[in-house]
Image (cartoon, grey):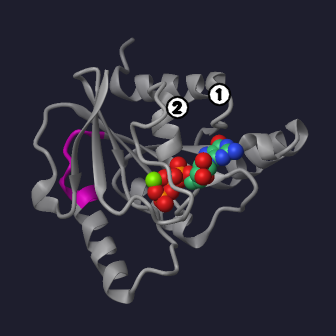
Amino acid sequence: MAHLVISAASPSQFPETDHQEVVFVGKSNVGKSTLINGLNNRKNLAYVGKTPGKTRLVNFYEINDQLMMVDVPGYGYAKRSTKEQTMYATLMEHYFSKRDNLKGMILIMDSRREISDDDWMMLELAKEKKLATAIALSKSKKLSYSQLKQAQMNVQNKAKVPVYTFDSDSFESFEEIQKQIQLWINPAE
Ligand SMILES: Nc1nc2c(ncn2[C@@H]2O[C@H](COP(=O)(O)OP(=O)(O)OP(=O)(O)O)[C@@H](O)[C@H]2O)c(=O)[nH]1
Ligand SMILES: [Mg+2]
């Protein structure tokens, strides 16, 4: 069972909860909302848009009464005004400093792209906060099998965190990411 608890426009709206939390970050349009839907076997839990920059609020999804999945706005969306970009940075700083039950960060990247400066910034931030991190390469079916394995190895060698791949067309591809999340929230199992 998964449902949207709140779409927060400011830190004062972040829900208070005892649930453990996993956050999904990445460039605009890479597939953050798609991954959240896939992990929950749902098509329309998180809003998936045709145009980049669709997720503008911090969306908190409660999963099985035990976990929060948090969908944050994508970065690198050029059409945002400077004021909006500053607001975004402030919102994210608050998010990372305030969530005591945050157990992990999944950084989503397009399989066909290199790690960007913004991606590195997020990886560094997680390291600083000692936050467990994994990368999920999206749109994996846009590459051949060997290209995908190459991309996965390349990213893994550079970022030195576990790298998974998924495609919205392949439900099996969500299983490994699901297992990673379970390890973060139930390390004893
Ligand atoms: N073929 C394919 N398309 C995908 C995949 N993941 C996402 N897309 C498409 O990419 C577009 C963006 O996906 P979203 O899940 O909305 O991306 P997002 O990262 O949440 O974007 P923002 O909320 O704007 O930051 C949509 O048109 C999706 O259908 C994938 O694995 N395969
Ligand atoms: Mg989104």
Q: Is residue 99 magenta?
A: yes
- Choose top left, top right, bottom left or bottom right for residue 184: top left
Q: In terms of image quadrants, where is residue 81? A: bottom left
Residue, disc 2: 38
* Gap between marks 1 and 2 measured at Cα: 9 Å
Which residue occupies the extreme top position in the image?
189
Residue at the image point whose x is 28% and y is 57% from the top: 96
Looking at the picture, how far across and down is residue 30, in whole percent? 58, 55
Query: Which secondary structure, mark 1?
Result: helix
User: Which amino acid lies under the numbered mark 1 shown in the image of this protein?
Assistant: Ser
How busy is the neighbourhood of tag 1: few (under 14 within 10 Å), some, or many (20 plus)?
some
Q: Which mark is residue 104?
A: none
Residue labelled 2 has its Cβ within 8 Å of some atom of ligand 1: yes
Frontmost residue, 132 versus 58 = 58
Q: Residue at x 48, y 29 (%)?
A: 39
The reply to whether the C-beta atoms of the residues labelled 1 and 2 are less than 8 Å apart is yes
Q: Earlier in the sequence, mark 1 or mark 2?
A: 2
Residue 187 visible from this viewpoint: yes
Q: Bin the neighbour count of mark 2 within 10 Å (Cα to Cα): few under 14, some 14-19, many 20 and up.
A: many
Magenta-drawn segment? 95-102
Q: Which residue is mark 1?
A: 173
Whether residue 160 is visible, yes or no, is no
